[in-house]
Image: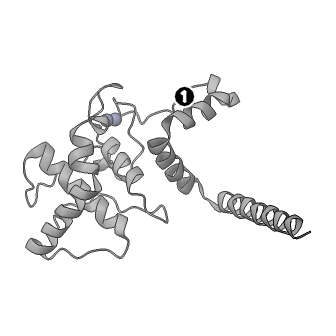
Amino acid sequence: MRGAQVAQQQEERRRMRRERIRAMVDNLDLEGMRNFLRILVERQPALFLEIWEQQPQAAGPALPEQPHWCNCSRCQEMPQLLEEVCCRGGMDSCLSMEPVEMDALVLDPGVLDLARLTLNDMFGMRENNEPNHTMRHVAYRQFTVWQYGRLGRGNRHVIPSCVVTRIRATYPSPNGQYRGYVPGRLV
Ligand SMILES: [Zn+2]
Ligand SMILES: [Zn+2]
């Protein structure tokens, strides 16, 4: 009798968990969904492709149409005209997918954490309450130093949209809100 009760309780817990997950999915807005999918694709690319290929839309175009100013196919529409910058690489040579330095210098959480501590120490950087906000900010900075060798006040470089997109996918904002390019802001 007791075994049956335990099994019933377990089934009830599973049912409640399924309902909770369903409610979480139902409450996601479009940007939240995109962020979630980007993380899923980063972590489980094989699983994503397997499910994608079973969907009826897989026969259609695999990628949404890219902004007209994008050459690499990984940029997204940006809110400000001056943010409409592509890495100018091709589909197979997009800077945001550069296999060694992007991971090692720009996305690696340990490297970002060390850079964050250095910025705090040297410039007294104010940290945002949202940890991923700080990680994104430090990642943009790491990218700029990697690409241009230095940061310069007044001539801050605009980071290509594909790179911004990848950094946001790796360190997403919990509410899907992102601050765009702010000229002259270094720390
Ligand atoms: Zn592009
Ligand atoms: Zn690109």
Indicate the position of residue 73 as horizontal and vertical percent values.
39, 31
Residue 4 versus residue 41 in the image, above or below: below
Q: Judge from the rendering whether residue 30 lies leftward or rightward of residue 73; answer left or right.
A: right
Which residue is at the far right?
A: 1
Picture quarter containing residue 12? bottom right
Q: Is residue 5 left or right of residue 133?
A: right
Q: Is residue 8 above or below residue 104?
A: below
**Which quadrant of the frame does ligand 2 lie within?**
top left
Between residue 129 and residue 85, name the one nearer to us. Answer: 129
Quick check: 180 above or below 49? Answer: below
User: Which residue is located at x 15 percent, y 55 percent?
Assistant: 156
Q: Quadrant of the N terminus?
A: bottom right
Q: Which residue is mark 1?
A: 62
Q: Is residue 12 above or below residue 101?
A: below
Q: Is residue 3 left or right of residue 128?
A: right
Depth check: give the residue in front, 104 or 63.
104
Percent position (x, y) of residue 42? Answer: 44, 43
User: Is 149 on the left-hand or right-hand side of 117?
Assistant: left
Q: Is residue 158 visible?
A: no
Pinpoint residue 146: horizontal percent, then vertical percent. Answer: 14, 46
- Residue visible at 27% across and 29% down? 89
Please name the residue shown 53% across and 47% down the image.
Answer: 37
Q: Quadrant of the C terminus?
A: bottom left
Q: Residue at x 43, y 62 (%)?
A: 173
**Neighbourhood count class around disc 1 (C-alpha, 10 Å): few under 14, some 14–19, many 20 upward:** few
SS type, badge 1: loop
Front residue (pair 20, 143): 20
**x and y percentages locating residue 137 in the rendered image:** 27, 61
Q: Amino acid at mark 1?
A: Ala
Q: Is residue 98 visible?
A: yes
